Image: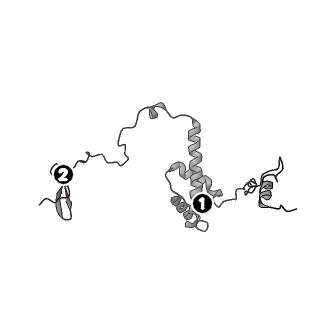
Amino acid sequence: MLPATAATFAKTLGKTAMVGEPRATHRRTRRPYKTRVRMPSKLDPHITAIEAWLAEQPQLTALAIVGRLREKYPEEFGKRQHSIVQRLLRALRRRAAERLVAQGPLDDATTAAPMPGVVDGSGYVGPDPPTAPLVEQAGKAIWRDRLIDIGSSSAMAPSR
C-alpha cells in the first residue's frame, strides 16, 4: 500500500518503529577481542643472563645487550634483534620500577630536603654569565649597516 501524497508519507515515517524495538545505528555491535597468546621469543632462553647484566649495569642499552648476545651466539643474534631486545628491556625495567614502588615509600631523608647542586642539570659550576647588555650598547642596535638609537622617540631614524 503506497501513500497518496508526500504529506501522508511524512506522517508515517516517525510511526513505523514499534515500541521496544531497537533503534538502527550505523555501528556494528562490539565484539570482545580474542585473547592473544604470547608467542615464544628468541630471547626466552637468555632472559636470566640479560637480567644479570642489568643487575650489574642498569644503564645498559638494547644495542649493548644485542652486542653481547651477538658475541656469545653469532648464529642467532644480529642487529635485527634490536627491537625485540628493546621491548624486553622496557618490560624488565617496568617490572623493576613496579617492585620499587610496591616496596613502600622512600626514606624521609631523601624526600624532605632537596639535594645540593645544580638544578638545571647542565653541570655548569662556574660563575653566572652576565645576562644584561653592556650599558654603552643598551639602547643601540644595528639595522641595515647603520647604528640606531632604540631608546629615542625616533627609533627608526638612523643616527650617524
> In screen coordinates, is 121 left or right of 17?
left
Is 128 covered by the magenta stretch?
A: no
Q: Which mark is residue 153?
A: 2
Q: Amino acid at mark 2?
A: Ser
Give SS at disc 2.
loop
Q: Position of residue 114 (x, y in %)?
A: 40, 36
What residue is shown at x 60% (from left), y 46% (from top)? 95
For this orientation, the residue located farthest to the right is 1
9, 35: nearer the viewer:
9
Indicate the quadrant where residue 25 lies: bottom right
Q: Position of residue 24 (x, y in %)?
A: 77, 55
> In screen coordinates, is 125 left or right of 76?
left
Q: Amino acid at mark 1?
A: Ile
Q: Can residue 78 be spotted in the picture?
A: no
Q: Is residue 118 above or below residue 53?
A: above
| Residue occupied by mark 1 | 84
Report the magenta residues as a range: 135-141
Q: Cα distance, mark 2 to mark 1?
A: 66 Å
Which quadrant, please, contains the C terminus? Answer: bottom left
Q: Which mark is residue 109?
A: none
18, 160: nearer the viewer:
18
**How many numbered marks have been drawn onto this rendered protein structure?**
2
| Mark 2 crowdedness (10 Å alpha carbons): few <14, some 14-19, many ≥20 | few
For this orientation, the residue located farthest to the bottom is 75
